[in-house]
DNA sequence: TAGTGTCC
DNA sequence: TCGG
């Protein structure tokens, strides 16, 4: 193995961003090939698609889901659905590699009994972004959010409890995991426009996995 | 209510 | 380019 590869997969200390918000640098790197293969299998069963938001505008990020429930948006609103609106079928199950990663990352951030029932898969191509928003469509706000970054770099913004005010800018690289919950669960967050780049495993895109307990 | 988009 |  090359020295660079060894270095990149070493465990690194968690970085505390807020009282209950943590960055786990390179946390997923040691299992990235398995994750990437399993993600591609999910995408083959439930295609990535750009969803509409109320008002009819289209998100730049393409999305799909795995798990008992998936986050969906259309002209009528945001919600969790047990089926893929595009096919009427259940979402694929969360692959074991993804589930185990989410549970262990939550534990590393102090959330001991996280059992996600939903995993949103987001694909950012060059120029894609996610405006500042809150994750508030879930029933169980005691469960944290676990967000896994794969592929090219992006800058995550972690704000306060309204849309305005100071925001932390957190550079995210392949394998980084963010966990936020407790008093920080409803913080506004988003992703700045992704710049063109190439990643050796994932190619010219950023893949984000967001694990939630939706029900 | 509108909205994770867009304008100023 | 950024904040609102």
Image (cartoon, coloured by chain):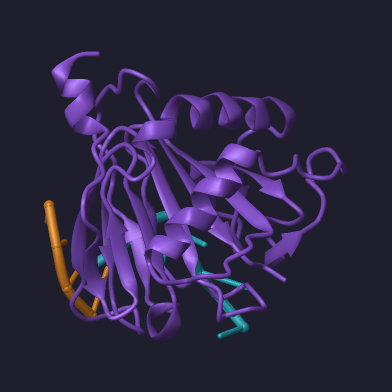
Chain colours: A purple, B cyan, C orange
| Residue in the image at 64% along x and 30% along y | A43
Residue A111 in the image: x percent, y percent?
Answer: 47, 71
Q: What residue sits 69% from the left and 66% below the top?
A: A79
**Res. A189 visible in picture:** yes
* Picture quarter with the N terminus of chain A: top left
Q: Is residue A52 above or below residue B7?
A: above
Instruction: Identify which residue is drawn at 42% across, 48% down.
Output: A148
Q: Is residue A20 left or right of residue A113?
A: left
Above or below, comparing residue A168 to residue A84 in the picture: below
Q: Quadrant of residue A6?
A: top left
**Along the horizontal axis of the image, is A127 left or right of A171?**
right
- Residues A150 and B6: in front is A150
Residue A196: give x, y in percent of width and height: 25, 28
Furthest residue toward top: A1
The reply to whether residue A72 is visible in this rendering is no
| Image coordinates for residue A108, horizontal then vertical, percent | 39, 61
Give the number of marks. 0
Q: Name the residue furthest right.
A: A88
A145 w.r.t. A159: above or below: above
Q: Residue A14 lies in what quarter of the image?
A: bottom left
The C terminus of chain A lies in quadrant: bottom right
Taking the image as shown, residue A212 lies to the left or right of residue A168, namely right
In-front residue for pair A56/A103: A103
Please give the name of the residue rendered at 72% of the width and 65% of the height, measured from the top-left corner: A76
């Amino acid at each position: 193995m090359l020295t660079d590869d060894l270095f990149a997969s070493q465990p690194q200390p968690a970085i505390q961003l807020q009282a209950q918000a943590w960055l786990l640098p390179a946390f997923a790197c040691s299992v990235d090939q398995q994750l990437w293969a399993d993600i591609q299998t999910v995408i083959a069963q439930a295609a990535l698609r750009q969803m509409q938001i109320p008002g009819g505008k289209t998100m730049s990020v393409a999305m799909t889901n795995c798990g008992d429930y998936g986050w969906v948006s259309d002209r009528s609103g945001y919600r969790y659905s047990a089926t893929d609106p595009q096919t009427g079928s259940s979402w694929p199950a969360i692959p074991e590699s993804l589930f185990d990663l989410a549970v262990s990352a939550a534990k590393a951030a102090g959330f001991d009994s996280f059992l996600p029932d939903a995993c949103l898969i987001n694909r950012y191509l060059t120029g894609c972004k996610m405006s500042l928003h809150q994750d508030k469509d879930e029933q169980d706000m005691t469960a944290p959010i676990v967000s896994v970054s794969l592929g090219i770099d992006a800058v995550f913004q972690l704000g306060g409890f309204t849309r305005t005010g100071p925001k932390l800018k957190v550079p995210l690289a392949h394998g980084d995991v963010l966990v936020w919950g407790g008093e920080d669960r409803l913080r506004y967050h988003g992703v700045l426009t992704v710049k063109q780049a190439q990643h050796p495993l994932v190619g010219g895109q950023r893949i984000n996995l967001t694990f939630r307990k939706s029900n």
